[in-house]
């Protein structure tokens, strides 16, 4: 079993750059957005020159006009419980209430356990025991939504998640931090890779790389801690 | 001068239906969203059969995965002040602080005034006076952001606005109501027309058509008022 | 062990009614909100007469000005994963990454299992096995955030959750529905009870009681299903 | 006529600090939030020691549990059109559709005009002309919602606005910037003053003071511009 998140970009807007370009210019132009859109340069590099200047000034509202959708699977319920805390995103997640697990459920093994063969064996055997206990409740007529109370955080889930580029930057800034859980860091990295937009790369980084300092209580030491104002 | 909103759909996702279909099935399926997406039927009608059942059950979260962008122009600042109250949408609006009006600014005449030639004439002349007063302040060295204090609600604005389909339905339910301002009703109607997705039409209606009753304090009489619970 | 959610109202605004009353009147009055606030009647009944008319017309924005905070504990992670999907609320939840479980962790037994002594016994014994397995990983030096991968959905969590009254109504409308998970229904009921505001009671009901029809795919039969428009 | 925003704090939660303290400790404690709340120190300084450490680490979610409400009046519609762009806040604003102006409407004079007696005189006279034109339309039977199309950005408005402390910090960071419109800067400053919570003061500052650099395209020079990453 592959033990890593699977991330696929399944949807993005037609005309991504042209939409952002039109939004950027609408704020400062006497032309209407229809006119701006129609007259937009065919050359991506020309559009990016404007877009990059606007975004580097922190005016992220202009990239809210681009929403992207990812299909994500093979992630633990530990991860998804964190992921759905992001409130500027849309989620459609596989339901443990309505979808009954059949036989051995899929699960994620944390690397700290996976790399030790004895612990990995214990983990795997225990997942089998959980599956058996779950099945026993199902066989006794307990509905899936209640039998799942024995299912572990390790149980694999899958979901469609959509967010605009501003939120993706926000998620990257938080979840690429070395203080984030390893699995959500990996999933976030895979999202950024799947998007594959070079112009966004300077923003799809841990927050410390944007701030120039670390504001976490316990820094990983990658950049200096902040000197607090006030 | 055309006195009506101009609305153009400038962006929507690739694979709109396939994305919603994948989201709908992900919740209730043992398959991963990647698998669902790949195996989605080529036939729109088949996908819509599922989608329509899910949405008619009020599970609107699945259509949040589709965001659309409109270029809107020739709308009054009276309209835009209302429009930006919708908090689940993204806006990039022409700035009166940074864009100086040159000569006669564009403006919108309300139909109640437009249909009376004498009042229309008064309105038009007064807009010219405002433009002259604005220009006088500009010429005296007052910055645009302050000179604009004399500009009227009638002044035309333009913007790029993006929202997901759930929010579009919400806006349609509120703003197609006959109690809404005529201009924002018209703009909303034009948005729905520009989107041109037949399957959404039963939802892109005034709220009373969905509820079966009117919950406004003063009903227009189209449908019966509600009998309050409790 | 008590097997039910524990809900306490820990914070609400000073002047709840006066704030909503001021908001309601501000929209329709030539007086400033300061004047309205200062001149507000001392009599709750008089303020409620206005408030109830405004809310019954669906103008819920006026009750967004009131936010309330609940301390919630003894709820399963199955519940909290659902609860945090509400995006118009604020959450501070006990972290399984940072808080190590000591000895037997607290857990919730679903009633379908609890009412059958043999199944309950199996469930309880299995929770002990999970605790032992968790402890074994901890003892082997695995960090809490990874050892928790064996912890079940049944594991008890606790959190502080805040939301405005509009969102509370929304949550009640969805989560008091008989189709909602039993535990989140119970927690929602306890929140409404803890708030204890009589004037809100007609709104803190399953959505079908407000709509007059059920829009779920499978109705519980309490009220008639809808006849679809369009 | 006073030419400045009037801001009054009309509502805040009971137990502001205790609520935030409980939220902060809930994340990292084996105790339930009820227990934490009940055992909270009576001493504000002790609670603040914890709170300040959590917030300075950027964990602003804990102060979302505190929402505050302001009555704001004597602000221009130019200001309110900007203010309502903040999407994490709740607004109840005086309606120009439903509230008819009687006689001379209140208005705001920008300081650049006010400080020049000749320009101020022109401005004042012009406001009288607008009031007369508005009245003429009203007298001709035009509804207020259409007659208001001649009313200027300078027209005074008033509203109740509520937001949580995280959003207040966000608004302060943006709107106390010298690049913001003078009037909204002033209103924001008055909000911070009205709140009067010493422990928040280091956060209620222009963003540059928190970042250590200016990310605006055109810096005012208060702090150095950023050296861009990437």
Image: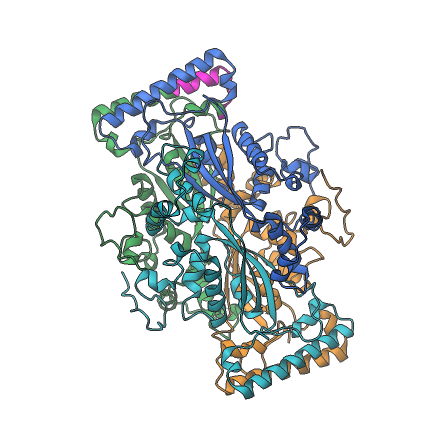
Chain colours: A green, B orange, C blue, D cyan
**Span colored in magenta:** A131-145
Task: Give the quarter of the image for residue B183.
Answer: bottom right
Position of residue D11 relative to residue C144, above or below, is below
Could you tell me residue A156's position as x and y percent?
A: 38, 32
Could you tell me residue A20's position as x and y percent?
A: 44, 62
Residue A194 visible in the snapshot = no
Residue extending farthest to the top is C118
Could you tell me residue D7's position as x and y percent?
A: 53, 63
Between D155 and C193, the one nearer to me in the picture: C193
Task: Give the quarter of the image for residue B73.
Answer: bottom right
Left/right placement of residue C123 relative to residue B84 reads: left
Residue depicted at x 31% and y 34%: C145
Between D211 and D205, the one nearer to me in the picture: D205
Quadrant assignment for the N terminus of chain A = top left
Could you tell me residue A78's position as x and y percent?
A: 37, 35
Residue depicted at x 62% and y 67%: B78
Indicate whether residue B190 is drawn in magenta: no
Quadrant assignment for the C terminus of chain A = bottom left
Residue C47 visible in the snapshot = yes
Between D7 and A62, the one nearer to me in the picture: D7
Total marks placed = 0
Residue depicted at x 66% and y 47%: B202
Indicate whether residue A134 is drawn in magenta: yes
């Amino acid at each position: 079993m592959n033990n890593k998140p699977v991330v696929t970009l399944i949807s993005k807007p037609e005309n991504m750059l042209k939409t952002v370009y039109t939004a950027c210019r609408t704020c400062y132009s006497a032309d209407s957005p229809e006119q701006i859109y129609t007259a937009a340069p065919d050359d991506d590099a020309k559009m990016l020159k404007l877009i990059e200047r606007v975004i580097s000034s922190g005016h992220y509202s202009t990239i809210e006009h681009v929403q992207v959708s990812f299909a994500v699977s093979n992630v633990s319920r530990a991860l998804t419980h964190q992921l759905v805390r992001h409130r500027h995103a849309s989620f459609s997640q596989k339901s443990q209430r309505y979808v009954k697990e059949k036989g051995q459920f899929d699960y994620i093994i944390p690397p700290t356990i996976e790399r030790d063969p004895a612990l990995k064996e214990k983990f795997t055997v225990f997942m089998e025991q959980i599956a058996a206990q779950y099945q026993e409740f199902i066989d006794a007529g307990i509905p899936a939504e209640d039998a799942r109370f024995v299912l572990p955080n390790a149980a694999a889930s899958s979901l469609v998640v959509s967010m605009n580029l501003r939120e993706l930057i926000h998620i990257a800034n938080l979840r690429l931090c070395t203080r984030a859980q390893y699995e959500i860091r990996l999933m976030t990295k895979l999202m950024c890779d799947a998007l594959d937009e070079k112009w966004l790369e300077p923003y799809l980084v841990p927050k410390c790389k944007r701030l120039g300092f670390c504001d976490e209580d316990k820094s990983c030491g990658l950049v200096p801690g902040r000197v607090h104002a006030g």
